[in-house]
Image: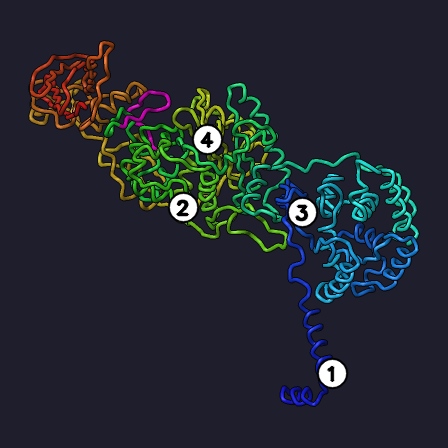
Amino acid sequence: MKIQIIKYFKQLSITRKVILILITILVIGYIFCLPRQLFHVPYSTVVTDRNGELLGARIASDGQWRFPPRTTTPEKIKQCLITFEDRHFYHHWGVNPVSISRAAYQNLKNKRIVSGGSTLTMQTIRLARNESRTFGEKFIEMILATRLEFRASKEKILSMYISHAPFGGNVVGLDAAAWRYFGHPAEELSWAEAAMLAVLPNAPAMIHLSKSRQLLLNKRNRLLKQLYARKIIDNSTYELAISEPLPDEPHPLPQTAPHLVSRFYQERNGKYSISTIDRGIQTQIENAAERWSNEFNQSDIRNLAILVIDIRTNQVVAYCGNVNFERKQAGNQVDVIQAPRSTGSILKPFLYYAMLQEGSLLPHTLLPDIPVNINGFTPQNFSLQFEGAVPASEALARSLNIPAVTMLQRYGVPKFHTFLRQIGLKTINRPASHYGLSLILGGAEATLWDVTNAYAYMGRSLLQLPQTECSLLLADAEGSGESEVFASGKSTDTFQSGAAWQTFNALTEVNRPEEIDWKSIPSMHPIAWKTGTSHGFRDAWAVGVTPHYAVGVWVGNATGEGKPGLVGARTAGPVLFDVFSLLPPTRWFKRPGDVFVKAEVCRKSGHLKGRFCEETDTLLILPAGLKTEACPYHHLITLSADETHRIYENCANLEPTIQKSWFTLPPVWEWYYKQHHPEYNPLPPFKTGCGEDALQSMQFIYPPMNARIVLPKQMDGSPGFLTTELAHSNPGTTIFWHLDNTYLTQTQDFHKISLQPTPGKHSLTAVDEAGNTVTTTFYIN
């Protein structure tokens, strides 16, 4: 075939060859004369809720309200445009010779341009080229219009035109015009509204709302009359349409979820995004946030953020990044949902979960709640009190700091640091050694987004759903689906249902004196919830989970100012419950099946049943919990017949005795525990003269072993004093104190003395009257 074409070309005359070459060049030029992409203009960032309702938009970079291009045209605007601009739109190939001829005749007759004769296709080309209107340009438009007809369907051409047509001022495109002039989407335009928008692009600079209103009204009504004459609308519709007044002035665009719209503006600039937000829920949440913000403002607490995740669909349904976006107040434009903030106690449930899952803790294991000094780190409970020993579940529910530090010390900071990274806390990005034990008390920063997602992961594990990060983007304008920016497809699968169930059960019991008693709210179903307060009262947190929703709340000042009343339980907690009251209530999670085993657990210590435990409960625990330590606090002791004294084994044959199981805590634990538990019975004293005590009878409260201490300065600049304290199971006994093998003094009842040691290493020894000895070493810096 190719050879035949070459032979035929050689046989042609030179003239015909030239003509053929010119024709070929023209054909090729015609084929490639139209750019692949017609419009090279910036677009506004547009965000809607999951049902297509506009949440907000940000203006395009060139200062125009130009929404991203449409793919369809509403029927009313289509009929109005075709009737007004190009009645033969569906019957020509881009150029209407009749219209061109009529326009030429009118222009010659009037000796000026009074009609262009352009089809909608030609007008689309003119909008894309944006060149001055000359006869030469008109010819180019005609050529390109016919080429466009071969490339695109009539519907596509019409949608391109209405997406880029000017509608007066800085309003470009049908969608922007519908919202700016009428305050609703183009699909909801009335016939009068559609007719007004159809005539505006004809002379947008001369006719708009602020001038020539009567001329605009006349043009609109003439078009409506034409629609009636062509029987596109009936008489009643026509009468109603012409009676509609023109809008007075442009409407402001909606400002729902403004911080989310700004986030899309930064990360999906110029795109049309269908978010996962439910506008109804979002509006209720924003109203609640504004109501609470007004109350907190009285205490100079100015910012608040709320995130609501539907954990079943794995989608965000409400995103309130802050309050009072429209006010030019410091911090209001900050999207706190994305801002790293000190975590306070909000990470404690993750440590509780990790230790349950590993098998290093049972739900109600007793943990120490006593003064500690770990290399100078001296954590305190919020109440500044100590209770000696507290069940782990209660310590979590009451957010006690010292048991949490003890747990982390036992579990290991590096391991917990790795776990937090695995569950998505991306801002904890420094080495574990940087945080140390303070990691569990707010020594790290996390975002409300990451923290709420981590709690949602735990809830999804109980629903046997993939533990992936929730999404914000339902689809873009082309319906291409979720974007990786807003929905990570990577699954953590870190949480296991058994330990998650036990953790959530502990969190349903949160009820500290300063917290809300959710059980007193009749309509409230169980919620696993936790609050947190950062050091210096800078951040207040609250996160709650039900089988349907995970809700995260942050309250504070985005500028970082601390306020005395900024406590999670008093600020973020009430907001959390208010949010849940706005959401549909749900039943509690079903207990996971086939993940627990039955075990006998000591009722007092929470450990597995020991040899001498008498009061036990049969509980469901994780299989890993079977390797935990058996109860170390129940001992078999020998008592005198009247149970007033303990009897040493070498004296037992001298008088009648009885043996009894006794619950005994370490001396320092006991010292604080019995102040809160009057039912606790300390061990009776030993009968004198019968030997030594096998159990530890005394223990230093302060200083702990290897503590590094800095003495305070007195008013005159001299070194201050160190106050040491000791707990003894028999407070009435006499204690003899020695510092570095030098006798100091003796105490009875209250075992506390003050020292003024020199810098360096020291050894403090205490001896009771029975000869029992205890020693601690400390360093003065």
Residue tagged 2: 495
Q: Position of residue 574 (x, y in %)?
A: 51, 26
| Mark 2 → mark 4, Cα distance in angstroms | 22 Å
Residue tagged 1: 15
Q: Earlier in the sequence, mark 3 or mark 4?
A: 3
Kindly identify which numbered label has been placed on residue 382.
Answer: none
Evaluate if marks 4 and 1 touch, with contact meaning CB atoms under 8 Å apart: no
Residue tagged 4: 541
Q: Position of residue 354 (x, y in %)?
A: 35, 41
Q: Quadrant of the N terminus?
A: bottom right
Q: Position of residue 661 (x, y in %)?
A: 22, 29
Magenta residues span 377-392
Whether residue 757 can be seen here: yes
Evaluate if marks 3 and 4 touch, with contact meaning CB atoms under 8 Å apart: no
- Helix, strand or loop status at disc 2: loop
- Helix, strand or loop status at disc 1: helix
Residue 201 sits inside the magenta stretch: no
Q: Position of residue 170 (x, y in %)?
A: 71, 42
- Quarter of the rendering containing residue 741: top left
Decide whether the magenta segment is chiefly helix, strand or loop.
loop
In the image, 540 versus 5, the foreground residue is 5
Closer to the camera: disc 1 or disc 3?
A: 1
Q: Earlier in the sequence, mark 1 or mark 2?
A: 1
| Mark 1 → mark 3, Cα distance in angstroms | 53 Å
Residue tagged 3: 67
The crowding category of the residue bearing disc 3, from other C-alpha atoms within 10 Å (few below 14, some 14 to 19, many at least 20), is: many
